[in-house]
Amino acid sequence: MSVVKRISRAFFSLEVAVVLSIFFMVAQIYATLGFASMTEAWKYVYETKWFEAIMWLLGLNLVGVMIRYKTYKKTPIFLLHVSIIVILLGAAITRYFGYEGTLHLRNGETKSVIMVQKSKGNPSNVYPVKLGFEVRLDKFVMRKYPGSMQPSSYDSYVTVIDKKHNKEFQYHIYMNHILVYGGYRFYQMSYDPDERGSILSVNHDPGMWVTYFGYILLAIGFLWSMIYKKSRFRLTIKKLQQSGLFAILLMLMVGGTYAKAFDFNEYAQKSKAVADEWSKVLVQQRGRIEPMDTLDLDIVHKLTYKAKMYGMNYNQIVAGMVAYPDEFQKLPLIYVGHPAIRKMLGIKGKYAPYNAFFLPNGDFRFSKEIDEAFKTPDKDRTKLQREFLKINERVYVAFTVYTAKIFKIFPTPNSKKMNYRWFSIADIQQAVKMNLMDPMTANFYFNLFKDLATGIKTYNVKLEKETREKIYQLQKDYSGEILPSPGRIKWEITYNRLQIFPKLIGVYTTLGLLAIILGFIEIIKLKRFPKLETTIVLLGYLGLLIHTANMLLRWYVAGHAPWSDAYESIVFIAWGSAFASLIFFRKSMLALGAGLFVAGMFMMVAHLNNINPQITNMVPVLKSYWLLIHVAVITSSYGFLGVGSMLGLLNLILFAMRKKYDLDKQIKQLNNIIYIALYIGLALLSIGTFLGGVWANESWGRYWSWDPKETWSLITMIAYALIIHTKMIPKMRGEFIFSLLAFLSFFFVLMTYFGVNFYIAQGLHSYGQGTAEGYWWINVIFAGMGAWIAVVLVTLFMGIVQKMNKPIELKDDNHANDYHPEYKGEK
């Protein structure tokens, strides 16, 4: 064999593909974690020649491997791999021949030149490019949510003037609605502070349609390979069907106080009915009209991280804070997370009264510490400083309740002209001074709010109801256009009161553990318990049905798909885990238990202290049908991958028990289920990520920008693609290695979601806060990913050494090598 042929054979191998893929992953990890800004990441990684070289080598290696192993003989598998080549070619065309710039226009201004950024690693290096036609900004309009400064949409009304082709037309550009003309795509990016000018992003991308074609091939390849008789996916399903342990269904892609001493116990017992009437008052919060019930729940959650305390529900607590401020300021209601701050306050438990945060002269006790925390850069803040900032927020929320500043319930007769702004009684005095409200109206509003407080104090349900109805009539007269329907108000209160999602933590976790325990018992005793299995499955279906119904209810109440923020997306991941286990893997108790347990864990994470469950308005970019598709597919993939990880862990436990029990058959069966879960998860993750690329291109002009979320999605895709392909590498195809990697791979998913959203907290996808809360959890994720890379490299090295010393022979007995690319199938 010639030297050239030896080098060629060595380079065009799966082992080299794994090594190059890991280099590629490490480079991306370095780019997202090693720099303080995206500008530095572009300068030192994404725009470098060495990073380009890795991508070219990966592409060449993939072409060679496809030819060497004759993947063209299996059309869907060939199509799946060709799609990657097409996507890489499209990316190369975009990288070398595309460009993007900005067009800044003031109202009435016309321009025919855009400023193009030569390098994202050096944003100041720009040069002009002539469009060949003119664009005039006729008018820029920023619409805001009622009564708030939060943008609802940005709109540029432009006129395109093409003298060369004798064309002139008007166009309305807004978020997710672009102008395409003359080889350019114009996007609404930003606006001038005075709202009289617009900044458009302009993109010229000759590689876009090539890349889109690659995305389509990828989706077809994945879906086709799932029904292709000779694919490893179908082969695995066949093995499971023969075992009788698994049957897969069709995938469904689808003020003052009274003279008498205040008694909290008496108040808790007598105030429930009157607090219920208080909860139905409509209030304006963050540009959203919602029942007071929602605001009360949000307030109490922020103050206490609970919904009930001292025998009072959240409505009773807030109503009491309004009616009896002096008494409730003495009640320990404000959560204090750091022991050092508890010591400073002189409290024993985790809760402090409002009064404890103020000195005898009325000054805030921690002004100096909080000022210092604000001055410290976010990345340098200590855990104590972060807790001081949280304390500051909680105390301020309590202050807005005691001063009634937070209760914006009163519109004005000229409400429509003021963007439907509503006022609290604390705002009324200032409104009178600004001539936004006349003194008589102001006095009338003061008396209405006083009647609300009096109704609470006297437990007068009739007075509370009559006052609430008077306020509602005013709201209807002056702001009727923006009020939610009575049905939606009623269902929102019902949604708040039911608290379904927190209750599902115990339901899913308990059922998951019971199924896992039953699965181990069945394996050890070699006996099935059909009645117990059926009971667990039916209870699981009931939990999933309730979960689904509550998501639909939140969708109706919020007016948008229930996966648009951190809380909602985590809840949806939990739904995906439960769905995957019950629909696809219910015939295996271990698989079912793993999925339900993972669902319970995600529901628990959704209700941790740093996740806000409040229903909020959507930012303009999320107002798109792409939100329904992209996020739903991505988060569904996390459910399947989570099931695969949990099953990997359970299989490792079976490995530890195999000396005492004969478990080889069960281990193989479980690994087959893991393979299917990972394959479906990878397919959904890949399709969802590239659908996100299409959405990004339709929203801000580029389908791939190396945003941290995009980058970590790609890293995760590579990690799972490598696991799927380990079945083709001799030393790495072992059952133990596969289970171990399946378990460890989920750390990449955790980094993609939690690490990017809450630790890196940069880029277009972050919900974040830029803190790891002591860094312990991010260190666990780093350790898991590091272990994954170490396992892959060590086993790969051992396999190469073994291959050099003793070549592997293909044998067809018992399908020992049926995952190998040169395996021809059954004889």
Image (cartoon, rainbow, N blue to C red):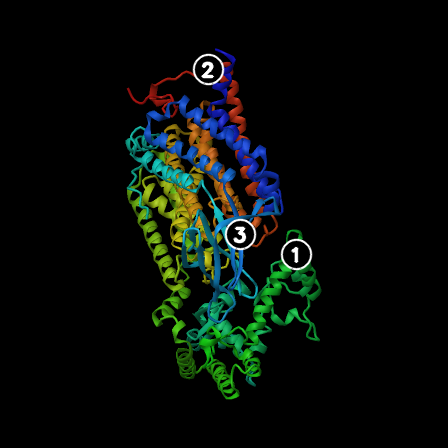
Where residue 384 is drawn, which disc sits there?
1
For residue 27, above or below residue 115: above
| Upstream in sequence: badge 1 or badge 3 | 3
Point out residue 145 in the picture as x, y percentages from the top left corner: 47, 67
Q: Which residue is mark 2?
A: 807
The amino acid sitting under disc 2 is Pro
Residue shown at the point (53%, 36%) measured from the top left? 25
Seen as rendered, the residue at the extreme bottom is 440
Q: Quadrant where the C terminus lies?
A: top left
Instruction: Bin the neighbour count of mark 2 within 10 Å (Cα to Cα): few under 14, some 14-19, many 20 and up.
Output: few
Q: Which residue is mark 3?
A: 113
The amino acid sitting under disc 3 is Val
**CA distance separating discs 2 and 3:** 63 Å
Of residues 136 and 703, the one nearer the viewer is 136
For residue 220, above or below residue 38: above
Instruction: Bin the neighbour count of mark 1 within 10 Å (Cα to Cα): few under 14, some 14-19, many 20 and up.
Output: some
Q: Can you see residue 349?
A: no
